[in-house]
Image: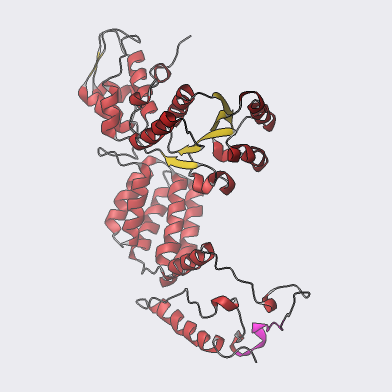
Amino acid sequence: MYEPLANRIRPKTFEEVVGQTKVIHIIEKMLQEEKLVSLILYGPTGTGKTTIAMLVAQYFPLNNYKFNASTDSKQTLRSIVETTKLYGNVLLIIDEIHRMNKDIQDYLLPYVETGKVIMLGLTTENPYIACNPAIRSRVSIFRLDRLTTNEIIKYLRTVTIDDIKPGLIIADDTYEYIGVAANGEIRSAINMLELLAIEADPNQLIGIDYAKEVLGKPALSVDKNGDDYYDILSAYHKSVRGSHVNAALHYLARLIVADDLESLLRRISAIVYEDIGLANPSMGPKVAAACDICRHIGFPEAINALGMITVEMCISPKSNSAHLAINAAIEDVRLGKTPKVPSHLINNPTYDNKSVYKYAHDFPGHIVSQQYLPTDLEGTVYYHAQLHTKLEKMLAEEYEKNQVILNQNHKG
């Protein structure tokens, strides 16, 4: 049975791992001290998460088990945890940990907390978003970065493929082509090299023309400098924010060729509310309509709607006042500023000392002075108008009129 090249040459020591120097150093130090703690390793595919986990299991003196959060059951986990009664501590490698349901998490957490189970979670998702806070608080989290093009090329030059087909010679520009096409994933690079070897004739020189013919186009989300898709998304976002139409169109073209419509539409939807905001609120519905059309017609027809909405977002006036306001409010909440809600704002007639709620629509101008913020936060201001656009200047004038009324003595 044929064993894939990537598996055959998987690193057998930490020194053989490509990249991830900082994380490897930390883990090696833990192993030397025999003080391994629970970890989550996250990052894109092909960055070495599984390889590092297997090396930890190989070098750390504990019984180790694997658990896939997508496919394995709670009963499987229970069987693994039961072994702690026989062996003491165990090492548990959890693949796709972001998919672990709450029931399984609740069962596992006490064992992780006491150290009976040393957990090594692996995921392509950001655990600060995708994983339960209870899990995050009990582990150390490390991000594995995509490899650079140069790191991949350097590694590929060390790979021997004579056992696939004898006498093959790889041209320098072919290594460079694979390095770019791999988009930071070492496994993809190895797979491409393996495919070229399988398809070639014995003693063949594998040049770039042959590589292009066999492999097709490279991952077009990257360029010769190794920029990945998310860097291009970021450049697109910043170009729209900076009102540079031509730069935005350039990065949009690269994103279109990368052929990931949903990621692009999510970013466009975020831009309009973060950076255009109250300077031109009508852009929100326009962008939503354009995104719906793009989903409906798909590529290649969607490129016209994407180009049109990008140009209009660039030219549109910008304001991030609402973005700054909500983030300031969120920061207060995260700092624990969550005092008791005023009693008259709560729909509970049994609330102690409940005062009368004034229904704003019953008052002139549909606004009435009464306490809205919790007592400890009265006077707090999150929204600061930006007056460089006509619309937000008009909104700011209305805001100030409202504040005059709302700041009147509301105790009467």
Q: Is residue 176 visible?
A: yes
Residue 257 placement (x, y as % from top left): 36, 41
> Magenta stretch: residue 362 in it?
yes
Pick the front one: 120 or 151: 120
- Name the residue rendered at 42%, 77% in the picture: 385
- Name the residue rendered at 55%, 79% in the picture: 378
Q: Is residue 262 above or below residue 314?
A: above
Pick the front one: 157 or 110: 110
- Residue that protrudes farthest toward the front in the picture: 33
- Name the residue rendered at 40%, 66% in the picture: 276
Extent of the magenta region: 355-364
Residue 315 placement (x, y as % from top left): 33, 65
- Name the residue rendered at 35%, 40% in the picture: 221
Q: Is residue 47 visible?
A: no
Residue 263 placement (x, y as % from top left): 45, 47
Q: Quadrant of the C terminus?
A: bottom right
Name the quadrant containing residue 405: bottom right
Left or right of residue 375: residue 355: right
Q: Is residue 102 above or below residue 239?
A: above
Q: Is residue 43 above or below residue 134?
A: above
Pick the front one: 316 or 369: 369
Residue 47 placement (x, y as % from top left): 40, 33
Q: Is residue 204 above or below residue 254?
A: above
> Magenta stretch: residue 239 in it?
no
- Residue that protrudes farthest toward the left in the picture: 172
Left or right of residue 95: residue 186: left
- For the stretch drawn in magenta, what is the main secondary structure? loop
